Amino acid sequence: MKDRDIIEAVRRAARQEQFLDVVSREEAEKRFRAAVPHKPLAAETVELAAALGRVLAENLTAPIDLPPFDRSSVDGFAVRAADTAGASEPSPVRLRLNKEVLACGTAPALTVAGGSATAISTGGVVPRGADAVVMIENTAFGEDDSGPYVDIKRPASPGGFIAFAGSDIARGETALRQGLEITSREIGVLAACGLSSVSVVRRPRVGIISTGDELVPPGGDLPPGAIYDSNSAITAAAVRENGGEPVLFGIIRDDEDALATRVEKAIAETDLVVLSGGTSKGAGDVSHRILSKLGKPGIIVHGVALKPGKPICLAVARETPVIVLPGFPTSAIFTFHTFVTPLIRALAGLQPRGEDVVDAVLPVRAASEIGRTEYVMVSLGQTQEGLVAFPLGRGSGSVTAFSQADGFFSIDALADAADAGTPQSVHLIGKGLHVPDLVLAGSHDIGLDAVVSILARQGVHVRTLAIGSMGGLAALKRGECDLAPVHLLDPKTGLYNTPFLSEGLSLVPGWRRRQGVVFRKGDTRFEGKAARDAIASVAGDPDIILVNRNAGSGTRILLDGILSGQRPAGYANQPKSHNAVAAAVQQGRADWGMAIENVARLYGLGFLAVGDEHYDFILADSRRDRPAVQAFLNVLGSGEVRAALHALGFVPGDLALAGE
Amino acid sequence: MKDRDIIEAVRRAARQEQFLDVVSREEAEKRFRAAVPHKPLAAETVELAAALGRVLAENLTAPIDLPPFDRSSVDGFAVRAADTAGASEPSPVRLRLNKEVLACGTAPALTVAGGSATAISTGGVVPRGADAVVMIENTAFGEDDSGPYVDIKRPASPGGFIAFAGSDIARGETALRQGLEITSREIGVLAACGLSSVSVVRRPRVGIISTGDELVPPGGDLPPGAIYDSNSAITAAAVRENGGEPVLFGIIRDDEDALATRVEKAIAETDLVVLSGGTSKGAGDVSHRILSKLGKPGIIVHGVALKPGKPICLAVARETPVIVLPGFPTSAIFTFHTFVTPLIRALAGLQPRGEDVVDAVLPVRAASEIGRTEYVMVSLGQTQEGLVAFPLGRGSGSVTAFSQADGFFSIDALADAADAGTPQSVHLIGKGLHVPDLVLAGSHDIGLDAVVSILARQGVHVRTLAIGSMGGLAALKRGECDLAPVHLLDPKTGLYNTPFLSEGLSLVPGWRRRQGVVFRKGDTRFEGKAARDAIASVAGDPDIILVNRNAGSGTRILLDGILSGQRPAGYANQPKSHNAVAAAVQQGRADWGMAIENVARLYGLGFLAVGDEHYDFILADSRRDRPAVQAFLNVLGSGEVRAALHALGFVPGDLALAGE
C-alpha cells in the first residue's frame, strides 16, 4: 500500500460520523411514528387450527346460541315442575315414563304432558312441555301395572338443571372482540360457534438483511478476523416473538450495488425491512447512501442519543419502513426493542409489550457518558434488604449481555454516573423475575460449570457472576452473594485465599489448577525447555511478544514474581482471562503468556508447568444453613464433580489439603 | 319403543356412575405421577430457525471464544499504550502509520512496532504488538516528510477500547444450560457460537380424540340436538401453548369398536392421548370399558372430588398415558390444566406454568357442594377498597366461562359456600391482570355491543357483566361498577328505571326496544292478529305452550300485566333471555312467548308488537368525572351509535325523551 493510499483508506473508514444528526429518543420516536402508521394490517382468513396467537380482525358476532337448545345439565328426567310439588323420599310423586330416552344428539319427538316424564342424558335436548329436569339420584324407576314409571323424591323448581338456549352465548351477541389475541380459550369459543376459519390481522412480513464483510453464517468455517452473524437469527426470532413473520435476505458484503439490489427486493416483498449493519461504521455508511437514494421521505432519523444504540437509522422508502440497526449485538437488540418491536406489534394488531419494573439497589458505581441516555444491563440478586442490581458491564459488543441480564436501568443523559447505593428502576427482560436460589460472585472457572450443572439438574437455580476474585469478596462482605469463588495469592505469605478470610467468612476448598507458560507448538524458543529457563531467555527480546494478565490476578502475581522486575515486550497487553491469553498466542498476536493447563490444551498450545493455583470458595457463615448452600457443599464433595474435575485436569481441593 | 325397552334404555344411560371411585385431587395427582414419569423426552436436533420456544436438551459448551479475537470496539488507531504517555491536545504524540487499514473481517499482516500505529475499524482485529486502541476523535492524521502519521492527543491505557478474545463467552465455558427455554436471546448466543442447529427436547405428540354422538366438527351444519365439537380445538391449542404437538384423531361416535380402534392407533402414534368425552355419561362409560381392556396398569384414577371435573379418568395403556376429560367444556379445560398441562410441560422439558394469584373480595355468596373442591370462575373489578371477584356462575357446560373469566378461586371440599364479603385468593387465567377502565354491570343488550366496540377502538377497556338489572343496581350501590344498564319496570307507576333511582344515582337515557309476542311464522293462531287478542285466545289452551321469562324481568312484568292472573301451559318455563324464548319457539319446544323485535327477526319468527321497553343506564354520580365514563357518555350520544341502534331497530333514548 502506498503512503497516499493509507491516508485515503483511513479517511474512508472514518467518514460515517458526518451523516449522524443525533436526536433524543423521544424525538426519534415522534418522527418515526409521524412517518410510519403504527396500525394493524389488513385482515386475512385462516383455518382455526392456525389461529393460535393471531389477532382477531373483526368482532365475532355469535352466529348461533350456545347452548343451541335448552339443555339438560344432568342425567335424569324431564318433567313439569308443578307435577313434583310436595315430592319427598317417604312420599314420592309417581310420573309415567314417556316412550323415548333423550340421549345426546337426538331431538325429542314427544311432548312431556302433565303427569309424565322423559328420561334424558346430560347434554340432551329438553323436550316440549317440560320445564325442569330431576337428577336421577333423586328418583327411582321401574314398572307397575300401568307401565314404566319414575318416582320423584324431591320437588323440582322451574328451570332446574336446564341450561337455556343462548345462556352461554346469545346469537347476535359480540362473543369476541376485534383486536383480541387468540389463545386456546378463544379457539374454544370460535369452535363452539361452529367456525372452522377466522378473520385475523395479517402478520407483518419483516425483511432481514445483515451487512458486513466480517460476517459468516452460522454453520460455516470461521476465517481469521471473521465473526458469525448472530443478528439475522436473533432479529428473526424477535420478529416471531412479536407477531411478525421474518423473511431472511441473507448476508451482504459492504458493496453498495449488491446491497441496493437486495434492499430493493426486500422493500418490494415485505412490510418492513430491518438491516443490521456490520460492526464497521463503513457498513452503516453504505446503508445510509442507499437509503438516501430510495425516494421520499427517505431518512427520518440517523443517530439517537442513547447507549447502546446511537448509530440507528430510521427511514421510509416508498411507504416501506427501513430500519438500520447498529451492528453490535446488544446495540442491535436494544434498538430493535425500542423502535422495531412497537411497530411490528402495532402492524400485527398486538397490544404493546407489557413491561415489568422492579426496584433494586445498585451496589457499585456505574459510569455514563453525558449527553446520551445510557441503558445498563444488570443481574439481580436478593439481599436481606431487598434486590440488588449488578451491572453486567459487557458492552454493546456482547452477545451474552442480553441473554444473561435480568433487566436494565437507565442513566439520564445529563448524569455522568449512577452512584453506588442508589435505588434504580429495573425493567425486567424476559419472563418475569426469577431470583436465584444461590449466588456465586467472583472468579469464574470452567470447573464451576460442572458443579452448577449438577445443581441445575437438582432444581437449584444458581447465578454465577464473573466479577473477579476481589469483586466477589467485596460482594460477599456486602451480603450480596452466598459464596465467592476466588484464587487470590497473597504476595507476602505466598499462600492462596486463606490470608483473605476475615470474621464470619470460611474457606471451602475447591480445586487446584496447573499454571504455566503457553506457546505455539513447535516454537523452539519454548519447546522442551523448563518454564523459568524459557522465560529468562525470551524476556529481553523485543521481537518476542508476551500477553500478560490484568493486575491483581493470581496469574499476574505469579509471573511478576518470576520476572522480578523485567518488562518483556507486550507486558502492557493485559487481558482478564486465560482464554484471551491462549487466543492471543494461538492467533499470533503474542508469542507467549501464562495460563492454566486445560486452557492450553483447549487451544492446542504447548505448555510448560510453573505451579499450582488454588481455586477455592469463601463462604459467608451466616448463609451456611441455607438449603441451596448445603446442596452446593454436597455436590462439591460428590464423586461426580471429582470425576469432572479430574477430566478437566484439576485436583480437587480436599486431596490437595490432605497433602497430595 | 316398548315398555320394557324404556326401562332398559334408562338403565343403560344411567349406569356409568358405578365405575366412579372418587378420590381427592391430591391423591389423584400422586397416583398419576407415580404411574407416569413426568420427565423430559429424548433429544432431537433442529435447525436454529426452528428452535424458538424449544428447550435445550444439553448444556451448550462454547465451541469458540466470543469475540474470537482481540477486537477494537471503536474506529481509531491500534498503538502501544506506552508510546502515548503524556500525549495531550496542545502537545500530541506523533506515531508513524503502518501501511495497512484493519477493516472488519481482515486479519492484520503487520506488527505494531514501538512508535507506530495501525488504522483500525470498529470490530477489527487488534494487530500483534498493539495493546490499546485510540479513538479517532482523539487523533489527527496526515502526511509529513517522513510519510503518513497520526497525532495522538490523549494517552491510551493498556487494553483501552479492546474487547479481548473470550471476554464475552470463553471457549469451553457453559454458555447456555440444559433445560433452558430458547427465546430470541438464546438464539443470538447459539448463532454467535456458529451453531446452525441445536439439540432440543422432543416435543410430546399428544393424540386428541373427541367422543360423542352429539358432536359435529366446526364448519359443518348443526342438526337438531347436536353441538359443535369445541374440545378438540381447545385441547389442541392448549397442547401447543404448553410445548406439545397436537395430533387430531377426529370425532368418534359412542361406538365401542370404533373408539377402541382409534384409541389403539393414537396410543401407537403418540406420547400421550387425551380423550374428551361427549357430554353424555354413556360416552365416558364406553371410554372406561376400552381403557380397562388395553392392558396394565390400566385405569389409575376414575373420579376426582373436584368441581368442575369430577368424572375425569386417568389411565396408562402400554406405557402411554391416556386421559379421559369430562365432556363439558369448562370441566374439560379445568381438568386439562390440572392433570394434562403439568405432564405435557414436563415431557417437553418446560418449567411448570407460573401462577399469578391476587387477593380479591367476593361481593356475593357462592354456594358449593360439600365433599368436592369447587373452583369458581370470576371476573375481577376494581373498587376504592381493592379488587372484587364476581362469580361468573356459568357452570361447567359453558364455553365462555374460561374465555371471559379473569381467574378462579376455590371453595374447600368441607365448605358449603364462600360467604359474601370474604377475601379470596384468585388464580389469574391468561396473561396477568388487566383491570378494566370501565365496568358495566346489569342487563345485557345487543345494542350495548355497538357502544362497547367503539370504546374498544378508542382504547377504552370495558368489562360488561351480565348479572341482570337488579344485580347491576346492587353492584352499583356497592361501588363495584361505573354504570348499571337496566330495564326495570315499576309496576305501581308503569314507569321504567326512573323509580329505581336514589341519592347519588342519575339516569343516562339509553334506547327503547319493542316488545311483543313471538311465534313461528305461518302459525295461524297468531299470524295477522293483534298481540293482546292473540294472547287472550291461546292462554287457556293446554296444548298451546308458552315460554315465559324469569320473575323480575321487565318482559315478565309486561306479560303478567296482560295475562292478569291467567297461567297458560308452559308458564313455569322461565328462561332468562330473549334469545332463549326465541330459540324455544323456533325449535318447537314452545309455541309463543314475549321477546324484543330484533331477536324475533334474528330467529325468523313472527312478531306482534305490545309496547316499548326502556333500556337505560344508571350512573353513580361519584364516577361521572372518570375519563372512561366521559368517553362512554360521548360515544353513547355519537352519530355512529345512533346509526347502529337504528339498524338494530332500537330508538335512541334522548329522542324518546324528546317526546317521539
Image (cartoon, coloured by chain):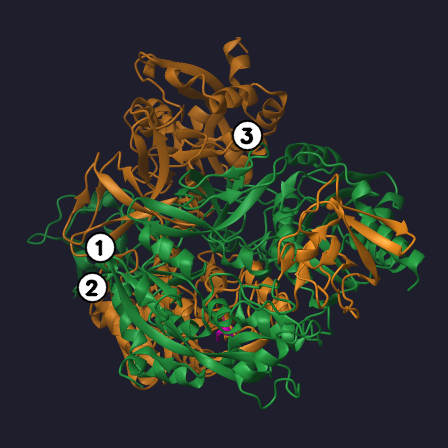
Chain colours: A orange, B green
Give SS at disc 1: strand
Q: Is residue A442 above or below residue B111?
A: above
**Neighbour tally class for label 1: few under 14, some 14-19, many 20 plus, Cα within 10 Å:** many
Disc 1 + disc 2, Cβ < 8 Å: yes
Q: Secondary structure at mark 2?
A: loop
Q: Which residue is mark 2?
A: A24
Name the chain under label 1. Answer: A
Query: Is-magenta flag for residue B430?
Result: no
The residue lying at 75 percent from left, 53 percent from top is: A76
Res. B64 visible in picture:
yes
Left/right of residue B253 with respect to residue B596 in the rendered view: right
Counting from the top left corner in percent of width and height, residue A478 is at 29, 25
Vertical order, A653 against B240 (above or below): above
Towards the viewer: B254 or A366? B254
According to the picture, the residue beneath numbered tag 3 turns out to be A455
The magenta-colored residue range is A56-60
Rendered residue at 53%/87% (across/down): B530
Tell how many labels: 3
Of residues B548 and B121, the one nearer the viewer is B548
Q: Which residue has dot 1 on it?
A: A373
Q: Is residue A57 magenta?
A: yes
